[in-house]
Image (cartoon, coloured by chain):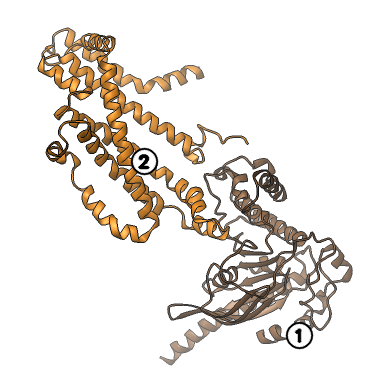
Amino acid sequence: MASTFRKNGAAAESLTPEYRVAPERHEAAKGLHVQEQDAPQRSIRQAAPAGAVSGEGGVALRLREVSKRFGTKYVLSDLSLDIEPGSFVAIVGRSGCGKSTLLRLLSGLDGASEGELTRDGKRVKDIDADTRFMFQDARLLPWQTVIDNVKIGLASVNATEAQRRAEAALELVGLADRANEWPSVLSGGQRQRVALARALVGQPHLLLFDEPLGALDALTRIDMQQLIESLWTSRGFTAVLVTHDVSEAVALADRVILIDAGRIALDIPITLARPRVKDSGFAHFEQLILNRVLQTGDNASGNRERSDFDI
Amino acid sequence: MNRWSRVYASSLPLFIPLLILVMWQLTTSTGMISDRTLPTLVDVFQAGVRLTLDGTLLEAITVSTMRAGTGLLIGGGIGFVFGLLNGVLGIADKLTDSTLQMLRNIPHLAMIPLVIVWFGIGETAKIFLVALGVMFPIYLNTLHGIRSVDPGLIEMGRVYGLSRWQLYRKVILPGAMPSILVGLRFALGIMWLTLIVSETIAADQGIGYMAMNAREFFQLDVVVFAIIIYALLGKLSDTMAKWLERRWLRWHPHFAKTAPPPKA
Protein backbone atom coordinates (compact mmCIF):
# COMPACT_ATOMS: atom_id res chain seq x y z
CA MET A 1 0.00 0.00 0.00
CA ALA A 2 2.78 2.34 0.94
CA SER A 3 4.59 1.86 -2.33
CA THR A 4 1.40 2.64 -4.23
CA PHE A 5 1.23 5.99 -2.50
CA ARG A 6 4.83 6.78 -3.01
CA LYS A 7 5.11 5.79 -6.63
CA ASN A 8 1.84 7.07 -7.90
CA GLY A 9 0.32 10.23 -6.64
CA ALA A 10 -2.74 9.65 -8.80
CA ALA A 11 -3.57 6.59 -6.79
CA ALA A 12 -3.56 8.59 -3.62
CA GLU A 13 -5.70 11.15 -5.32
CA SER A 14 -8.26 8.58 -6.44
CA LEU A 15 -8.65 7.37 -2.87
CA THR A 16 -9.82 10.75 -1.81
CA PRO A 17 -11.84 12.19 -4.67
CA GLU A 18 -14.31 14.12 -2.53
CA TYR A 19 -11.52 16.00 -0.73
CA ARG A 20 -9.90 17.40 -3.81
CA VAL A 21 -9.18 21.05 -3.40
CA ALA A 22 -11.71 23.29 -5.06
CA PRO A 23 -10.01 25.82 -7.37
CA GLU A 24 -11.54 28.87 -5.71
CA ARG A 25 -10.08 27.89 -2.35
CA HIS A 26 -6.67 27.93 -3.95
CA GLU A 27 -6.89 31.65 -4.29
CA ALA A 28 -7.30 31.99 -0.56
CA ALA A 29 -4.18 29.99 0.10
CA LYS A 30 -1.41 31.99 -1.45
CA GLY A 31 1.01 30.08 -3.59
CA LEU A 32 -1.14 27.03 -4.16
CA HIS A 33 -1.79 26.21 -7.77
CA VAL A 34 -4.43 24.09 -9.36
CA GLN A 35 -3.19 20.57 -9.50
CA GLU A 36 -2.96 18.33 -12.49
CA GLN A 37 -4.69 15.01 -12.11
CA ASP A 38 -1.59 12.99 -12.96
CA ALA A 39 0.87 14.74 -10.63
CA PRO A 40 -1.02 16.26 -7.76
CA GLN A 41 1.73 17.02 -5.29
CA ARG A 42 4.37 18.28 -7.66
CA SER A 43 2.58 21.44 -8.62
CA ILE A 44 2.02 22.65 -5.09
CA ARG A 45 3.88 25.90 -4.54
CA GLN A 46 6.34 24.95 -7.23
CA ALA A 47 5.84 28.14 -9.17
CA ALA A 48 6.34 30.98 -6.74
CA PRO A 49 3.42 33.39 -6.52
CA ALA A 50 3.90 36.71 -8.25
CA GLY A 51 3.86 38.55 -4.93
CA ALA A 52 6.91 36.76 -3.58
CA VAL A 53 9.61 39.12 -2.39
CA SER A 54 12.91 38.67 -4.18
CA GLY A 55 15.40 36.54 -2.32
CA GLU A 56 12.64 34.49 -0.77
CA GLY A 57 11.53 31.04 -1.77
CA GLY A 58 12.60 27.57 -0.92
CA VAL A 59 15.38 25.18 -1.71
CA ALA A 60 15.01 21.75 -3.22
CA LEU A 61 16.29 18.77 -1.29
CA ARG A 62 17.33 15.53 -2.92
CA LEU A 63 18.37 12.34 -1.20
CA ARG A 64 19.75 9.34 -3.04
CA GLU A 65 20.20 6.07 -1.18
CA VAL A 66 21.14 7.86 1.98
CA SER A 67 21.99 5.76 5.01
CA LYS A 68 23.04 6.69 8.49
CA ARG A 69 24.52 4.29 10.95
CA PHE A 70 25.94 4.65 14.41
CA GLY A 71 28.57 1.98 14.80
CA THR A 72 27.09 -0.98 13.01
CA LYS A 73 23.47 -0.10 13.70
CA TYR A 74 21.62 1.44 10.77
CA VAL A 75 19.24 4.18 11.85
CA LEU A 76 18.32 5.11 8.29
CA SER A 77 18.83 2.86 5.30
CA ASP A 78 18.66 3.56 1.58
CA LEU A 79 16.45 6.59 1.67
CA SER A 80 15.66 8.26 -1.62
CA LEU A 81 13.53 11.34 -1.45
CA ASP A 82 12.88 14.57 -3.33
CA ILE A 83 11.51 17.61 -1.57
CA GLU A 84 10.12 20.33 -3.80
CA PRO A 85 11.23 23.91 -3.23
CA GLY A 86 8.73 25.76 -1.09
CA SER A 87 6.83 22.68 0.00
CA PHE A 88 5.86 21.81 3.54
CA VAL A 89 6.79 18.24 4.38
CA ALA A 90 5.97 16.52 7.65
CA ILE A 91 7.91 13.49 8.79
CA VAL A 92 6.07 11.32 11.26
CA GLY A 93 6.88 8.10 12.99
CA ARG A 94 7.23 6.39 16.31
CA SER A 95 9.99 7.53 18.59
CA GLY A 96 13.32 6.04 17.66
CA CYS A 97 12.32 5.43 14.04
CA GLY A 98 15.03 7.73 12.73
CA LYS A 99 12.95 10.79 11.86
CA SER A 100 15.03 13.20 13.93
CA THR A 101 18.20 11.69 12.49
CA LEU A 102 16.83 12.34 9.00
CA LEU A 103 16.17 15.97 9.92
CA ARG A 104 19.70 16.37 11.21
CA LEU A 105 21.03 14.96 7.96
CA LEU A 106 18.92 17.41 5.97
CA SER A 107 20.29 20.27 8.06
CA GLY A 108 23.90 19.23 7.67
CA LEU A 109 24.38 19.05 11.44
CA ASP A 110 25.19 15.36 10.94
CA GLY A 111 26.67 13.78 7.85
CA ALA A 112 25.25 10.75 6.06
CA SER A 113 27.21 7.52 6.31
CA GLU A 114 26.38 6.56 2.75
CA GLY A 115 24.54 8.04 -0.20
CA GLU A 116 24.18 11.52 -1.57
CA LEU A 117 22.26 14.45 -0.15
CA THR A 118 21.99 17.72 -2.05
CA ARG A 119 20.44 21.11 -1.39
CA ASP A 120 19.59 22.93 -4.64
CA GLY A 121 21.99 20.61 -6.43
CA LYS A 122 24.87 21.29 -4.04
CA ARG A 123 26.17 18.57 -1.79
CA VAL A 124 25.30 19.20 1.85
CA LYS A 125 28.46 19.39 3.95
CA ASP A 126 27.59 21.53 6.95
CA ILE A 127 24.75 23.73 8.06
CA ASP A 128 24.73 27.06 6.20
CA ALA A 129 23.16 30.47 6.71
CA ASP A 130 20.32 29.51 4.40
CA THR A 131 19.20 26.70 6.68
CA ARG A 132 17.67 27.14 10.12
CA PHE A 133 16.81 24.51 12.65
CA MET A 134 14.18 24.80 15.36
CA PHE A 135 14.54 22.51 18.31
CA GLN A 136 11.96 21.15 20.69
CA ASP A 137 13.19 23.61 23.30
CA ALA A 138 13.67 27.23 22.34
CA ARG A 139 17.41 27.34 23.15
CA LEU A 140 17.49 31.06 23.78
CA LEU A 141 20.51 32.50 25.52
CA PRO A 142 19.17 33.33 28.99
CA TRP A 143 21.76 36.10 29.43
CA GLN A 144 20.65 38.06 26.40
CA THR A 145 17.47 40.04 26.01
CA VAL A 146 14.80 38.81 23.65
CA ILE A 147 15.88 41.15 20.86
CA ASP A 148 19.56 40.26 21.23
CA ASN A 149 18.60 36.62 20.95
CA VAL A 150 16.82 37.35 17.70
CA LYS A 151 19.89 39.20 16.41
CA ILE A 152 21.91 35.98 16.67
CA GLY A 153 20.08 34.97 13.52
CA LEU A 154 21.73 37.87 11.67
CA ALA A 155 25.37 37.50 10.82
CA SER A 156 27.43 40.34 9.38
CA VAL A 157 24.75 43.01 9.43
CA ASN A 158 25.44 46.45 10.89
CA ALA A 159 23.92 47.34 14.23
CA THR A 160 21.08 49.62 13.14
CA GLU A 161 20.04 47.29 10.36
CA ALA A 162 20.18 44.33 12.76
CA GLN A 163 18.01 46.22 15.24
CA ARG A 164 15.46 47.08 12.57
CA ARG A 165 15.25 43.57 11.20
CA ALA A 166 15.14 41.95 14.63
CA GLU A 167 12.29 44.27 15.60
CA ALA A 168 10.46 43.39 12.40
CA ALA A 169 10.91 39.67 13.10
CA LEU A 170 9.57 40.08 16.63
CA GLU A 171 6.64 42.02 15.25
CA LEU A 172 5.98 39.09 12.94
CA VAL A 173 5.63 36.67 15.85
CA GLY A 174 3.67 39.17 17.93
CA LEU A 175 6.27 39.84 20.60
CA ALA A 176 7.48 43.33 19.68
CA ASP A 177 6.54 44.62 23.12
CA ARG A 178 8.73 42.06 24.91
CA ALA A 179 11.93 42.95 23.02
CA ASN A 180 13.90 44.16 26.04
CA GLU A 181 12.95 41.46 28.51
CA TRP A 182 14.91 38.41 29.61
CA PRO A 183 13.83 35.08 28.13
CA SER A 184 13.31 33.70 31.65
CA VAL A 185 10.17 35.79 32.15
CA LEU A 186 8.50 34.48 28.98
CA SER A 187 6.17 31.48 28.79
CA GLY A 188 7.14 28.35 26.86
CA GLY A 189 5.07 29.36 23.85
CA GLN A 190 6.51 32.87 23.81
CA ARG A 191 10.04 31.47 23.93
CA GLN A 192 9.30 29.30 20.91
CA ARG A 193 7.99 32.39 19.15
CA VAL A 194 11.26 34.16 19.87
CA ALA A 195 13.12 31.10 18.55
CA LEU A 196 10.95 31.29 15.43
CA ALA A 197 11.73 34.99 15.01
CA ARG A 198 15.44 34.20 15.39
CA ALA A 199 15.16 31.47 12.75
CA LEU A 200 13.27 33.70 10.32
CA VAL A 201 15.19 36.94 10.73
CA GLY A 202 17.97 35.79 8.38
CA GLN A 203 15.34 34.87 5.75
CA PRO A 204 16.38 31.24 5.36
CA HIS A 205 15.19 29.18 2.44
CA LEU A 206 14.99 26.00 4.43
CA LEU A 207 13.45 25.74 7.86
CA LEU A 208 13.68 22.47 9.75
CA PHE A 209 11.47 21.86 12.76
CA ASP A 210 12.32 19.12 15.24
CA GLU A 211 9.08 18.74 17.20
CA PRO A 212 9.09 22.45 18.00
CA LEU A 213 5.62 22.32 19.54
CA GLY A 214 6.04 19.09 21.47
CA ALA A 215 6.48 20.76 24.83
CA LEU A 216 3.63 23.25 24.48
CA ASP A 217 0.09 23.05 25.77
CA ALA A 218 -2.73 22.30 23.35
CA LEU A 219 -4.00 25.87 22.89
CA THR A 220 -0.55 27.40 22.46
CA ARG A 221 0.21 24.66 20.00
CA ILE A 222 -2.76 25.61 17.79
CA ASP A 223 -1.64 29.24 17.89
CA MET A 224 1.89 28.27 16.90
CA GLN A 225 0.67 26.02 14.10
CA GLN A 226 -1.29 28.89 12.61
CA LEU A 227 1.69 31.19 12.98
CA ILE A 228 4.06 28.75 11.30
CA GLU A 229 1.57 28.14 8.50
CA SER A 230 1.00 31.82 7.80
CA LEU A 231 4.74 32.58 7.85
CA TRP A 232 5.40 29.70 5.51
CA THR A 233 2.64 30.88 3.18
CA SER A 234 3.98 34.42 3.04
CA ARG A 235 7.71 33.60 2.93
CA GLY A 236 7.68 30.52 0.74
CA PHE A 237 10.61 28.74 2.38
CA THR A 238 10.87 24.96 2.26
CA ALA A 239 9.70 23.55 5.58
CA VAL A 240 10.36 20.10 6.99
CA LEU A 241 8.59 19.27 10.23
CA VAL A 242 9.36 16.26 12.36
CA THR A 243 6.51 15.39 14.67
CA HIS A 244 4.89 12.44 16.36
CA ASP A 245 1.54 14.20 16.23
CA VAL A 246 -0.25 12.98 13.09
CA SER A 247 -2.94 15.61 13.44
CA GLU A 248 -0.30 18.35 13.46
CA ALA A 249 1.30 16.85 10.36
CA VAL A 250 -2.02 16.82 8.51
CA ALA A 251 -2.83 20.35 9.66
CA LEU A 252 0.41 21.83 8.32
CA ALA A 253 1.95 19.73 5.59
CA ASP A 254 1.54 19.35 1.83
CA ARG A 255 2.96 15.93 2.14
CA VAL A 256 3.37 13.48 4.99
CA ILE A 257 6.17 10.95 5.09
CA LEU A 258 6.01 8.11 7.58
CA ILE A 259 9.33 6.65 8.62
CA ASP A 260 9.40 3.19 10.08
CA ALA A 261 12.58 1.38 11.11
CA GLY A 262 14.74 3.70 9.03
CA ARG A 263 12.72 3.41 5.83
CA ILE A 264 9.91 5.36 4.21
CA ALA A 265 6.77 3.43 5.01
CA LEU A 266 4.28 5.89 3.59
CA ASP A 267 4.47 9.05 1.51
CA ILE A 268 1.22 10.80 0.73
CA PRO A 269 0.23 14.24 -0.45
CA ILE A 270 -2.28 16.08 1.71
CA THR A 271 -4.65 17.61 -0.78
CA LEU A 272 -6.70 19.71 1.61
CA ALA A 273 -7.19 23.42 1.09
CA ARG A 274 -5.70 25.95 3.49
CA PRO A 275 -6.45 27.18 6.06
CA ARG A 276 -7.32 23.69 7.16
CA VAL A 277 -10.29 22.86 9.28
CA LYS A 278 -10.87 19.60 11.05
CA ASP A 279 -13.60 18.33 8.74
CA SER A 280 -14.17 14.82 7.42
CA GLY A 281 -11.40 15.20 4.84
CA PHE A 282 -8.96 16.05 7.58
CA ALA A 283 -10.14 13.08 9.61
CA HIS A 284 -9.72 10.84 6.58
CA PHE A 285 -6.05 11.72 6.16
CA GLU A 286 -5.42 11.58 9.86
CA GLN A 287 -6.97 8.12 10.10
CA LEU A 288 -5.12 6.91 7.03
CA ILE A 289 -1.74 7.85 8.44
CA LEU A 290 -2.54 6.82 11.97
CA ASN A 291 -3.64 3.38 10.81
CA ARG A 292 -0.35 2.93 9.04
CA VAL A 293 1.59 4.10 12.10
CA LEU A 294 -0.29 1.69 14.32
CA GLN A 295 0.12 -1.07 11.77
CA THR A 296 3.90 -0.84 12.11
CA GLY A 297 3.48 -1.33 15.84
CA ASP A 298 0.99 -4.20 15.31
CA ASN A 299 3.42 -6.03 13.10
CA ALA A 300 6.02 -5.91 15.75
CA SER A 301 3.72 -7.16 18.47
CA GLY A 302 2.19 -9.69 16.07
CA ASN A 303 5.61 -11.16 15.41
CA ARG A 304 6.25 -11.37 19.08
CA GLU A 305 3.01 -13.24 19.72
CA ARG A 306 3.74 -15.68 16.96
CA SER A 307 7.17 -16.45 18.33
CA ASP A 308 5.60 -16.95 21.73
CA PHE A 309 3.36 -19.62 20.19
CA ASP A 310 6.33 -21.30 18.61
CA ILE A 311 7.82 -21.83 21.98
CA MET B 1 2.86 49.46 59.52
CA ASN B 2 4.33 48.16 56.28
CA ARG B 3 7.21 50.59 56.52
CA TRP B 4 7.97 49.56 60.08
CA SER B 5 8.00 45.90 59.17
CA ARG B 6 10.47 46.74 56.39
CA VAL B 7 12.77 48.57 58.79
CA TYR B 8 12.42 45.66 61.17
CA ALA B 9 13.32 43.16 58.46
CA SER B 10 16.34 45.10 57.27
CA SER B 11 17.72 45.63 60.79
CA LEU B 12 17.25 41.99 61.77
CA PRO B 13 20.70 40.81 60.57
CA LEU B 14 22.30 43.48 62.77
CA PHE B 15 20.65 42.21 65.91
CA ILE B 16 23.11 39.48 66.90
CA PRO B 17 26.29 41.52 66.20
CA LEU B 18 24.87 44.38 68.30
CA LEU B 19 23.99 41.99 71.09
CA ILE B 20 27.52 40.62 71.09
CA LEU B 21 28.99 44.15 71.26
CA VAL B 22 26.76 45.04 74.20
CA MET B 23 27.62 41.81 76.03
CA TRP B 24 31.30 42.41 75.33
CA GLN B 25 31.28 45.89 76.79
CA LEU B 26 29.23 44.80 79.83
CA THR B 27 31.36 41.78 80.71
CA THR B 28 34.69 43.56 80.26
CA SER B 29 33.85 46.89 81.90
CA THR B 30 32.37 45.19 84.97
CA GLY B 31 35.51 43.08 85.34
CA MET B 32 33.78 39.74 84.73
CA ILE B 33 36.41 39.24 82.03
CA SER B 34 39.83 40.64 82.88
CA ASP B 35 41.22 43.31 80.59
CA ARG B 36 44.34 41.15 80.31
CA THR B 37 42.15 38.60 78.50
CA LEU B 38 39.94 40.91 76.46
CA PRO B 39 40.06 44.71 76.30
CA THR B 40 36.80 46.62 76.57
CA LEU B 41 34.89 47.74 73.51
CA VAL B 42 35.65 51.37 74.33
CA ASP B 43 39.40 50.63 74.57
CA VAL B 44 39.35 48.94 71.19
CA PHE B 45 37.40 51.84 69.73
CA GLN B 46 39.94 54.32 71.14
CA ALA B 47 42.81 52.27 69.75
CA GLY B 48 41.07 52.41 66.39
CA VAL B 49 40.72 56.16 66.53
CA ARG B 50 44.36 56.54 67.55
CA LEU B 51 45.64 54.31 64.73
CA THR B 52 43.43 56.04 62.21
CA LEU B 53 44.61 59.50 63.23
CA ASP B 54 48.32 58.75 63.12
CA GLY B 55 47.97 57.10 59.69
CA THR B 56 49.20 53.66 60.77
CA LEU B 57 45.87 52.04 59.96
CA LEU B 58 45.57 53.46 56.46
CA GLU B 59 49.10 52.39 55.62
CA ALA B 60 48.56 48.89 57.00
CA ILE B 61 45.27 48.45 55.13
CA THR B 62 46.80 49.73 51.89
CA VAL B 63 49.73 47.35 52.12
CA SER B 64 47.54 44.36 52.99
CA THR B 65 44.95 45.12 50.32
CA MET B 66 47.64 45.51 47.68
CA ARG B 67 49.06 42.12 48.60
CA ALA B 68 45.65 40.49 48.58
CA GLY B 69 44.65 42.11 45.30
CA THR B 70 47.88 41.30 43.50
CA GLY B 71 47.75 37.70 44.68
CA LEU B 72 44.12 37.38 43.63
CA LEU B 73 44.83 38.84 40.21
CA ILE B 74 47.77 36.57 39.52
CA GLY B 75 46.36 33.38 41.04
CA GLY B 76 42.83 34.02 39.84
CA GLY B 77 44.10 34.82 36.37
CA ILE B 78 46.10 31.62 36.15
CA GLY B 79 43.20 29.55 37.52
CA PHE B 80 40.78 31.19 35.09
CA VAL B 81 42.99 30.62 32.06
CA PHE B 82 43.58 26.98 32.93
CA GLY B 83 39.88 26.49 33.64
CA LEU B 84 39.01 28.02 30.28
CA LEU B 85 41.61 26.02 28.36
CA ASN B 86 40.81 22.72 30.02
CA GLY B 87 37.09 23.30 29.66
CA VAL B 88 37.35 23.84 25.93
CA LEU B 89 40.34 21.83 24.72
CA GLY B 90 40.41 18.13 25.51
CA ILE B 91 44.15 17.94 24.95
CA ALA B 92 44.87 20.70 27.49
CA ASP B 93 42.59 18.96 29.97
CA LYS B 94 44.42 15.67 29.55
CA LEU B 95 47.76 17.39 29.88
CA THR B 96 47.23 19.57 32.95
CA ASP B 97 44.10 18.60 34.87
CA SER B 98 45.52 15.68 36.87
CA THR B 99 48.60 17.72 37.81
CA LEU B 100 46.44 20.61 38.97
CA GLN B 101 44.19 18.28 40.94
CA MET B 102 47.26 16.86 42.66
CA LEU B 103 48.64 20.28 43.55
CA ARG B 104 45.21 21.34 44.75
CA ASN B 105 45.30 18.77 47.49
CA ILE B 106 48.43 20.22 49.07
CA PRO B 107 47.37 22.66 51.82
CA HIS B 108 49.03 25.80 50.49
CA LEU B 109 49.79 27.08 54.00
CA ALA B 110 52.02 24.04 54.49
CA MET B 111 54.30 25.67 51.94
CA ILE B 112 55.10 28.59 54.29
CA PRO B 113 58.50 27.31 55.52
CA LEU B 114 59.57 26.56 51.98
CA VAL B 115 58.24 29.88 50.69
CA ILE B 116 60.20 31.78 53.35
CA VAL B 117 63.35 29.98 52.27
CA TRP B 118 62.63 30.77 48.64
CA PHE B 119 61.44 34.34 48.84
CA GLY B 120 62.37 35.56 52.33
CA ILE B 121 59.73 37.53 54.18
CA GLY B 122 59.24 40.15 51.47
CA GLU B 123 56.17 40.89 49.39
CA THR B 124 56.81 38.05 46.93
CA ALA B 125 56.32 35.37 49.56
CA LYS B 126 52.89 36.62 50.60
CA ILE B 127 51.70 37.30 47.08
CA PHE B 128 52.87 33.83 46.06
CA LEU B 129 50.91 32.20 48.87
CA VAL B 130 47.75 34.17 48.15
CA ALA B 131 48.02 33.40 44.43
CA LEU B 132 48.51 29.72 45.14
CA GLY B 133 45.51 29.69 47.46
CA VAL B 134 43.03 31.45 45.18
CA MET B 135 44.08 29.67 42.01
CA PHE B 136 42.31 26.39 42.68
CA PRO B 137 38.80 27.52 43.59
CA ILE B 138 38.77 29.75 40.50
CA TYR B 139 40.17 26.97 38.34
CA LEU B 140 37.71 24.35 39.54
CA ASN B 141 34.67 26.57 39.27
CA THR B 142 35.59 27.94 35.84
CA LEU B 143 36.09 24.39 34.59
CA HIS B 144 32.84 23.23 36.14
CA GLY B 145 31.01 26.27 34.78
CA ILE B 146 32.19 25.65 31.24
CA ARG B 147 31.35 21.97 31.41
CA SER B 148 27.87 22.70 32.66
CA VAL B 149 26.99 25.03 29.79
CA ASP B 150 23.92 23.56 28.10
CA PRO B 151 25.18 21.59 25.05
CA GLY B 152 21.91 22.53 23.36
CA LEU B 153 22.98 26.17 23.38
CA ILE B 154 26.34 25.27 21.86
CA GLU B 155 24.58 23.35 19.12
CA MET B 156 22.30 26.34 18.60
CA GLY B 157 25.45 28.42 18.14
CA ARG B 158 26.55 26.00 15.47
CA VAL B 159 23.21 26.22 13.66
CA TYR B 160 23.57 29.99 13.57
CA GLY B 161 27.14 29.81 12.34
CA LEU B 162 28.77 31.52 15.33
CA SER B 163 32.54 31.68 15.06
CA ARG B 164 34.65 30.10 17.77
CA TRP B 165 35.27 33.49 19.36
CA GLN B 166 31.58 34.44 19.27
CA LEU B 167 30.68 31.08 20.77
CA TYR B 168 33.13 31.82 23.57
CA ARG B 169 31.93 35.30 24.25
CA LYS B 170 28.20 34.87 23.75
CA VAL B 171 27.54 31.33 24.94
CA ILE B 172 30.33 29.67 26.90
CA LEU B 173 31.60 32.50 29.08
CA PRO B 174 28.20 33.88 30.16
CA GLY B 175 27.02 30.32 30.74
CA ALA B 176 29.98 29.62 33.00
CA MET B 177 29.73 32.97 34.78
CA PRO B 178 27.47 31.94 37.71
CA SER B 179 29.91 29.20 38.60
CA ILE B 180 32.96 31.43 38.09
CA LEU B 181 31.51 33.97 40.51
CA VAL B 182 30.94 31.27 43.11
CA GLY B 183 34.61 30.42 42.65
CA LEU B 184 35.50 34.07 43.15
CA ARG B 185 33.63 34.19 46.44
CA PHE B 186 35.47 31.10 47.67
CA ALA B 187 38.72 32.62 46.48
CA LEU B 188 38.11 35.87 48.37
CA GLY B 189 37.69 33.95 51.61
CA ILE B 190 40.90 32.02 51.01
CA MET B 191 42.65 35.24 49.98
CA TRP B 192 42.13 36.94 53.36
CA LEU B 193 42.82 33.78 55.31
CA THR B 194 46.13 33.22 53.55
CA LEU B 195 47.10 36.83 53.93
CA ILE B 196 46.38 36.89 57.66
CA VAL B 197 48.40 33.76 58.29
CA SER B 198 51.37 34.82 56.18
CA GLU B 199 51.39 38.37 57.57
CA THR B 200 51.28 37.01 61.11
CA ILE B 201 54.20 34.69 60.55
CA ALA B 202 56.50 36.88 58.52
CA ALA B 203 55.95 40.51 57.73
CA ASP B 204 57.25 43.97 58.49
CA GLN B 205 54.18 45.84 57.26
CA GLY B 206 50.42 45.36 57.01
CA ILE B 207 47.55 44.55 59.32
CA GLY B 208 48.96 41.22 60.44
CA TYR B 209 52.25 42.85 61.31
CA MET B 210 50.39 45.58 63.19
CA ALA B 211 48.64 42.92 65.29
CA MET B 212 51.80 40.90 65.96
CA ASN B 213 53.75 44.01 66.83
CA ALA B 214 51.06 45.08 69.30
CA ARG B 215 51.19 41.65 70.94
CA GLU B 216 54.90 42.25 71.72
CA PHE B 217 53.88 45.30 73.74
CA PHE B 218 50.76 43.61 75.08
CA GLN B 219 48.46 46.15 73.40
CA LEU B 220 45.48 43.80 73.30
CA ASP B 221 43.17 46.60 72.14
CA VAL B 222 45.21 46.94 68.93
CA VAL B 223 45.22 43.17 68.43
CA VAL B 224 41.44 42.97 68.72
CA PHE B 225 41.09 46.02 66.51
CA ALA B 226 43.18 44.33 63.80
CA ILE B 227 40.93 41.28 63.97
CA ILE B 228 37.87 43.49 63.51
CA ILE B 229 39.50 45.14 60.50
CA TYR B 230 40.06 41.73 58.93
CA ALA B 231 36.42 40.88 59.51
CA LEU B 232 35.33 44.13 57.88
CA LEU B 233 37.63 43.67 54.89
CA GLY B 234 36.33 40.14 54.42
CA LYS B 235 32.76 41.34 54.55
CA LEU B 236 33.55 44.18 52.14
CA SER B 237 35.06 41.90 49.53
CA ASP B 238 32.14 39.51 49.81
CA THR B 239 29.76 42.41 49.25
CA MET B 240 31.73 43.38 46.16
CA ALA B 241 31.44 39.84 44.83
CA LYS B 242 27.70 39.91 45.45
CA TRP B 243 27.50 43.22 43.63
CA LEU B 244 29.28 41.63 40.65
CA GLU B 245 26.79 38.77 40.74
CA ARG B 246 23.88 41.16 40.64
CA ARG B 247 25.46 43.09 37.82
CA TRP B 248 26.65 40.21 35.64
CA LEU B 249 23.84 37.79 36.35
CA ARG B 250 20.98 40.21 35.84
CA TRP B 251 19.42 37.74 33.45
CA HIS B 252 19.25 35.05 36.11
CA PRO B 253 15.75 34.68 37.58
CA HIS B 254 17.30 34.74 41.06
CA PHE B 255 18.71 38.23 40.54
CA ALA B 256 16.06 39.49 38.16
CA LYS B 257 14.05 41.18 40.91
CA THR B 258 16.91 43.36 42.05
CA ALA B 259 17.98 44.56 38.62
CA PRO B 260 15.66 44.87 35.61
CA PRO B 261 17.21 44.62 32.13
CA PRO B 262 18.52 47.80 30.54
CA LYS B 263 16.10 49.54 28.24
CA ALA B 264 17.64 49.90 24.82
* Colour in which chain A is drawn: brown
Q: Where does label 1 land, which residue?
A: A11
Write the residue at 35% across / 39% down: B184
* Residue B206 screen position, x and y as percent: 23, 23
Asked whether B185 or A93 is in front, the reply is B185
| Type of the residue with mark 1 | Ala
In the image, is A43 to the left or to the right of B165?
right
* Residue A119 screen position, x and y as percent: 65, 72
Q: Is residue A212 above or below residue B245?
A: below
Asked whether A193 or A109 is in front, the reply is A109
Q: Is residue A250 above or below residue B232?
A: below
| Type of the residue with mark 2 | Val
Question: CB of mark 2 within 8 Å of CB of mark 1?
Answer: no
> Can residue A261 be seen in this snapshot?
no
Write the residue at 47% across / 51% down: B168
Q: Chain of mark 1?
A: A
